[in-house]
Image: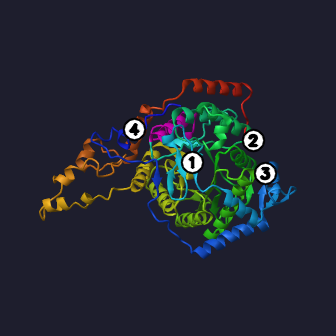
Amino acid sequence: MANPDHSRSHGRRHRRRRSRSTRSVDYHNLRNPFTPLNIYSSDRIVALHNASLQVLQEMGIKVLLPEARKILRDGGALVDDDTQMVRIGADIVEACIRTAPRRIILRAGSREKDVTLELGRLTFLSGAGAPHATDLEGGRRPSSLADYLDLVRLADQFDAIQMQNNMVEAQDIPTHLRHYPVMEAQLELSAKAPSILTRGRRQNLQKFEMLRIFRGLTDDDFTACPHMHTVINTNSPRQLDNPMAQGLIDFARFGQLSIVTPFCLMGAMAPITVAGALTLSHAEALASIALTQLVKPGAPVCYGAFTSNVDMMSGAPAFGTPEQVRANLASGQLARLIGLPWRCAAGTSSKVNDAQAANETQMGLWSSILAGSTIIIHAAGWIEGGLTVSFEKFITDMEVVQMFADLCQIRSGKEDDLALDALREVAPGGHFFGCQHTMERYQTAFYQPLVADWSNIGTWEEQGSKDTTSRAAEIWKEIVNNHVPPAIDLNRLEELRRYIAVCQASGGAPPNS
């Protein structure tokens, strides 16, 4: 596949916002500049890890898929097919942790968009899995393929979003056919690594084949390294359902990346205490990781944790809470204990793009970053506890994501940054606006906002007194309308479409088939 124009800078991508020179930044390859923050002592973390091993060995996990139970049984686990309960010994789990890779390179459509996943790296993904979309003009609605396409375009446009994600469901397409346009959209509109939903073996294998065809890969090329990723959510408490287990098996067998993430809500699907919820979450993640390694030692897999609490008055999920912050920080300690790259998440319960949405999302982002998360999902656009993706919130969240990305930039540390010449030039009581040191740097010294308005009130009123959400609406529409997809091989695209047509003519692939 021909490479897209990777020379587009942060500034050029948003040229409507600036006409002056732009800073040279790399928002794609980020390293977390912050020392991971520990909330528990190392002894406490080891005790929590051991408690999770005890859960797996003594209580077990319910595994609904017979194929998965057989793999676990062959690996030494104790399996009761009548109850579907699987008890996994600590020695099995520890051995599987040792074979899981510490460093994963996720291949994209071009080498410039490859992503390295390891402790110390930092990547952001958009909100995902929502059945609804909303924007200022169209309001909240069941999400459609058109919404999905526009969100793929938005995610492609920002370097600080390193991979594609399944942001919304294309609900106007039947589920047995939905994966065809969704997968094609990610491949055709973006060079970033795609994300797929695991909804049964037939869909999994067809999506593998679609990528292989589009990228011009041999079977060996495809299985040699991961080219796509999926999120595997366990069914807390202590259950792994058929499509999730099937996804773990298929992705491991074909060398693709599984991001294992129990979704544990304290007081609902998990114990009400942070430590209790993490004991459950860690146990479920370890069991799932073990399954991948028993399928294929060295299979790419990321540890994951998404733990928050519920509103005990209504039972609704809550995000950006102190409890979620504590859980995120402790999850980072558990990930570092086992040494694997890992995924965390932000999020909000707010129904609209308001102050609550911003506050809760930032709390989740900050805690994920300070926890040392490798992948932060739901970093942009997610509202209503994951039921909706907001186009305007995608933009306002990207302001924050880009600021975090900017904090990751390595500064020169040159001698002239100390500004001694400027200090000599400007007399006491003067100003630095016009000094030589400032004039040489003013165009590129500071982060330039995407949607924030830093002008004075007079200028703001002259420009229509628009609030942030109104400005965000203009920005996302401009990005979508002017999006330039990567250059692609038209022969491969035609081959892909022929393959899709054959699959559709044969009845598609119903979920769980």
Specify the label residue 423 is tagged with: none
Q: Within the magenta stretch, is there residue 144?
A: yes
Marks 4/2 in contact by CB < 8 Å: the verdict is no
Q: Nearer the viewer, residue 331 or 436?
A: 436
Q: Position of residue 88 (x, y in %)?
A: 77, 62
- Residue 184, given in percent of the width and then of the height, sits at 59, 32
Q: Earlier in the sequence, mark 3 or mark 2?
A: 3
Compare marks 4 and 2 and give the one earlier in the sequence: 4
Q: Percent from the top left, x then y, of residue 180?
A: 64, 32
Which secondary structure, mark 3?
Answer: helix
Question: Which numbered circle lies on residue 105?
Answer: 1
Label 1 is placed on what type of residue? Ile
Residue 178 visible in image = no
- In the image, which is nearer the foreground, mark 3 or mark 2? 3
Count residues near mark 4 (Cα–Cα under 10 Å), then give few for <14, some for 14-19, many for 20+: few
In which quadrant of the rendered image does the C terminus lie?
top right
- Residue on which the image places disc 3: 68
Residue sitting at the far right: 82
How far apart are labels 3 and 2 at the CA level?
Answer: 14 Å
